[in-house]
Amino acid sequence: MEFKIKGMTCEHCATAISKRFEGKESIVSTNISYPDGSGKFEFDPDFITKEEIAGIINSTGHYKVVGEIRLKSKDSNRFDLIIIGGGSAAFSAAIKAESLGLKTLMVNGGLEFGGTCVNVGCVPSKNLIRAGEAAYHATHSNFAGIKPKGVDIDFAQIIKDKKKLVSILQEKKYMDVVSDFKNLTLLKGWAEFKDEKTIIVNGRQQFQASKFLIATGASTNIPDIEGLNKVDYLTNISLFNLETQPESMIVLGGGYIALEIAQAYHRLGTDVTLLQRSSHILSNQTPDIAQELTRNLTNEGLNIYTSLDFIEVGEKNGKIYVIAKQNGLRKIFEADKIVVTTGTLPNTNNLGLKNIGLEVNTDGHIKVNEKMETNLEHIFAAGDVVNTPAYVYTAAMEGKVAVENAFTDSIKNVDYSSLPWVIFTDPQVAGTGIDEDQAAIQNIPFEVSKIELKDVPRSIAANDTRGFIKLIRNKDTDKLIGARIVAPEGGELIQQLSMAIKYGITIGDLADNLYPYLTLGEGIKLAAITFGKDVSKLSCCAS
């Protein structure tokens, strides 16, 4: 490395800096130049980092490192940063690393570069959700005077268009972004730690780095049900590439992935049955959310069964069957295909983490603090592989913060207290902050306000009053501490409420603000007013 050094006024200054590094075996050579205002260092990154070198120079009190230039490394297998993984967290980290001039290696196995979101997650699922929505609105109307004439669905074309979109975004938003990076090397392969500073890729190549970021994501958790591993089950990876539409389909699971898939394929014409172990779908949410969403999904014709004890999965006469008990009664479900959407497990099994003593939770997630640091000071982790909220945007933030904390003096934390999230069913489910159950556990004095959409003018005018808006406030401070929304396009409201929580906005502030009439956002004002008034007795636009 060549460091630009401020404060040298003569050759004696250069000599004084050189003396600071005498006797350090990690320093191969130094060349401090007063006329150039720089210092060139050849060093072993396994034993000293460039940050430590800069710190020694700065510790004199007279001289300060004000910039750095990377010189050609004598070892092509040595890097400042090795990123294991190739998804959102990995690319965000690589972008930040490039801006810092770090020599970076990204090793990615499994899914194509871009990871889950663009290849088999957010992009394909939301594309199919919108396709299903278009088909549904072509056959259903909220207005008696409008008679839909139906729709012709070319399922194979929908999947082909989805594949094209995925390919375009994978190239445009990932590969093209890093195509001109001077310090980044991309490598396809499986990485395993040999020791704390060394990985082996594909069992052959060895690479070393001063810092590591593990961002290997997660994969579908396959439940231990008798016979399941003997049938040709699908996951989101294989389902979204299936160009022949199943006539019928069983979806195992009741979380957001299960619900989004079930409704999208049902609206495209597949007979879908959703099977869930828990007493209600979205088992991590309060029952009122599950009840409202279940009512609307079953009204569309989705078959939803909860409180099931699974006994066996098998195949007979070309059909997949599931045997389960519900309240002690034996039930048999049958379909052409079965999709497993029963949560995820972090991809940590084959990383050689035991070789280096990296700590993981009982479910395999890597333990990190709010700085994305692991128990090893030079190894960081981010994204679905750690036990933090699993969203593409949190992964991206975590990857960026990890690199900043690893290589700069700017220490940052990731704050999830006002995290907004959306489930893209119809109606959508969205939330931010804590709900009433969590407030009770935390002993926060809280109060809840809920307004049904039948009392929101926009929803009344649209003849679509599905859902509600629920606000949770701290009774002592009047500050908003949480919100839950079930509404058509309700996800478009949640960022406003997230910002309200982050910046300490009170319910009084939300109630007193001006909102455009006949927008769904006006429902926030009405929900805030509901803490003190019955809005059903107010005139339109009244406060």
Image: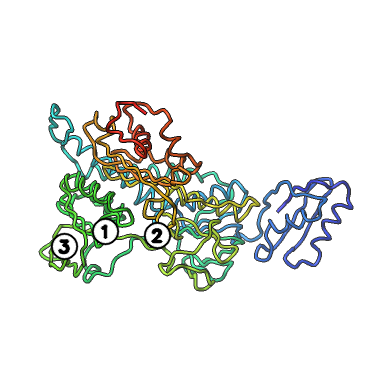
Question: Residue 201, percent across and down?
Answer: 49, 65
The colour scheme of the drawn protein is: rainbow
Residue at the spot of label 1: 253
Q: Residues within 10 Å of mark 3 (few under 14, many from 20)?
A: many
Amino acid type, label 3? Ile
In the rendering, at what x and y percent does residue 321 appear?
A: 15, 63
Q: CA distance from mark 3 to mark 1?
A: 16 Å
Give the residue number, with chain letter if any, for mark 3: 320
Which quadrant does the C terminus fall into? top left
What is the three-letter code of the residue carrying label 2? Ala
- Residue 42 relative to residue 328: left or right: right
Measure the C-alpha gap from mark 3 to mark 2. Answer: 26 Å
Question: Residue beneath label 2, please?
Answer: 218
Q: Give the residue type at disc 1.
A: Gly
Q: Quadrant of residue 206?
A: bottom right
Q: Would you say 404 lies left or right of 390 here?
A: right
